[in-house]
Image (cartoon, helix red, strand yellow):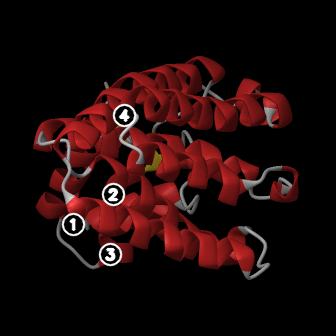
Amino acid sequence: AVDRLRNDILGGTFTPSTRLRIDELKARYGVGGSPMREALSRLVAEGLVHALSQRGFRVAPVSADDLLDITETRQSLEGTAIERAIERGDDAWEGDVLGAFHRLEKYLTRGQEINRANLTEWEEIHANFHHTLISACGSPRLIGFCHQLYNQGTRYRHLLQDYNFASRDLVAEHRDLVDAVLSRDAKRARAVLEQHIALTADIILSTETDIIEGAPV
């Protein structure tokens, strides 16, 4: 129930601020009331669901301030994580990074547009790349926090489903990260990663202003 509801929130099936009714969710996912409430409580802890004072739940709303907070916190935590991963990662980790990049590059160079029809596949490939970058940092808690922030940012990236990604060289952006990692240049890797995270937020704020500013809080 947790995984399915999380995926439906991240994928936009349940849009920001949507009221989440226990009876409807029980029927949708085929689980009882107690497991459903536990699933909702876990997603509250992940920042994807808000608990209401009237004993209800809703999908977390979106706002420009929230996006900036997610972005700056991701930059701080993932920047630290990638520095630690470069310090501690071994040859096997480097191989994993190369493998994750190869899969991402192969997807992007086959010329398929990133849109709602293939968003799930792209997000799985993209998330795997970013998680692999920091996987050798040696801190499960740090990885966990980065994973939660990544998921929170995913909802905002999905606002870009109609954005023309041809204006960005996504292969080059991610290759720069790989080059910095493989050269063991922690300072450069952090700078490139922070810039990469900031660019997506900048695009969302410049192209989806009406959606974010008009969202209920």
Q: Nearer the viewer, residue 113 or 178?
A: 178
Q: Quadrant of the C terminus?
A: top right
Q: Earlier in the sequence, mark 1 or mark 4?
A: 4
Q: CA distance from mark 4 to mark 2?
A: 11 Å
Instruction: Name the mark nearer the viewer: 1 or 4.
Output: 1
- At 20% from the left and 42% from the top, the residue drawn is 137
Is disc 3 in contact with disc 4, using a CB cutoff of under 8 Å?
no
- At 57% from the left and 21% from the top, the residue drawn is 68
Q: CA distance from mark 1 to mark 2?
A: 11 Å
Structural crowding at the residue carrying mark 3, measured as other residues with C-alpha within 10 Å and reported as few (<14), some (14–19) or many (≥20): few
Q: Earlier in the sequence, mark 3 or mark 4?
A: 3
**Up-down: is 188 above or below 85?**
above
Identify the disc placed on residue 29: 3
Q: CA distance from mark 1 to mark 4?
A: 20 Å
**Up-down: is 62 above or below 97?**
above
Structural crowding at the residue carrying mark 4, measured as other residues with C-alpha within 10 Å and reported as few (<14), some (14–19) or many (≥20): many
**Which residue bears the numbered disc 2?**
132
Tell me if I can see residue 181 in this picture: yes
Residue type marked 2: Thr
Structural crowding at the residue carrying mark 1, measured as other residues with C-alpha within 10 Å and reported as few (<14), some (14–19) or many (≥20): few
- At 65% from the left and 22% from the top, the residue drawn is 64
Q: CA distance from mark 2 to mark 3?
A: 31 Å
Instruction: Name the mark nearer the viewer: 1 or 2.
Output: 1
Residue type marked 4: Glu
Q: Earlier in the sequence, mark 1 or mark 2?
A: 1
Q: Quadrant of residue 52?
A: top left
Residue type marked 1: Ala
**Which residue bears the numbered disc 1?**
92
Secondary structure category for the residue under label 1: helix
